[in-house]
Amino acid sequence: TVAKAQWGGFGDFGGFGGFGGFGDNGNNGNNNNNGGNVAVSGDTVKIMPVGDSITFGEGERGGYRKYLYSALTQKGYKIDMVGPEGSNSASANGIQYDDNNAGYSGFQIKEIPGWGQQQGGEGSLYNKLKSKNAVKQSQPDIILLIIGTNDMTANRSMDACANDLRALLDYMLGDMPANSIIFMGSIPEFTAYGGNSQRIANYNGTVKKVADEYANKGKNVRFADVHGCLNGMADIGGDQLHPSGNGYKKIGNFWAGVVDEYLQSIKSNNGGKEDETGSGSGNGEVELSNCSSKITRQGYKCCSKNCVVIYTDDDGKWG
């Protein structure tokens, strides 16, 4: 039996540079809620990178994804990168990595861009993922989402972007396992196509607002400040739009830190144990002898895949 731990209540992931010590700065249709779990005892963790050309890796093969995969596997995790694109094995910059992903260059969140209207309706990430049944087929434990740069170059309003993000989240949450999580990343700086710091900051604030809105509703969605791990335009390439090689490395290491922090929080909540037993007393509390979690009359936090909830009334009698 692989122990699974409840998690939740920790804050946003962001602004920590190389967060996590990496250096450079199946139940479809269920409502995901705060209190999800994922196997942490030697199981393979399925990660789905989702987004536009920054996820695809425009300008450098594999983009941030190869650094993410390398950092996590060096930490000892068994990682399966999932998604409808790429292959199970690739090599770039001397790094062997799992290349599967859902990154699409030029794509907006949901609206079909002008160029896409001339190409059979291409350009909508929401539409592409749905048409490929991508999330349901991949069943990821973790989705890493960076999207919105092309919405900014298309002059989309913040309200429109927020609504599109909600539609995308609702779709992904509905098709991914009930205990999976989505990390919504902020977008990097860019100056091409009229990009400017204030508009980018406004959009990133919108991403955080939507992520927090879902988290506060008990959904497994968290904000991650990708923008904050980069040194502004100094980490953007010559096209003034996509990260440089160093920028991609920073993003990969940042995401690796976010994933590691998340998985370690689960392991910590579980006390590192796989099996647990419980016993009750008249004080309204059950101690799980091989687990850091406990059940109280106010609620419960369970760290077993096969958890049995035992309840008591205020008289201390178990039923």
Image (tube, rainbow, N blue to C red):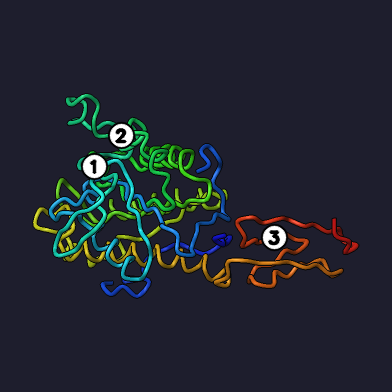
Mark 1–mark 2 distance (CA, rounded to whole Å): 9 Å
The N terminus sits in image quarter: bottom right
Secondary structure state at the residue bearing disc 2: helix
Q: Is residue 315 left or right of residue 110?
A: right
Residue 300 image label: 3
From this view, report whether residue 82 is shown above or below residue 160.
below
Residue 128 image label: 2
Mark 2–mark 3 distance (CA, rounded to whole Å): 39 Å
Q: Are marks 1 and 2 in contact (CB under 8 Å)?
A: yes
Residue at left offset 22%, top offset 48%: 56
Q: Badge 1 is on which residue?
A: 104
Give coordinates of residue 278: x percent, y percent: 73, 66
Q: Is residue 281 left or right of residue 217?
A: right
From this view, report whether residue 301 is shown above or below residue 47.
below
From this view, report whether residue 105 is shown above or below residue 223.
above
Q: Is residue 268 left or right of residue 277?
A: left
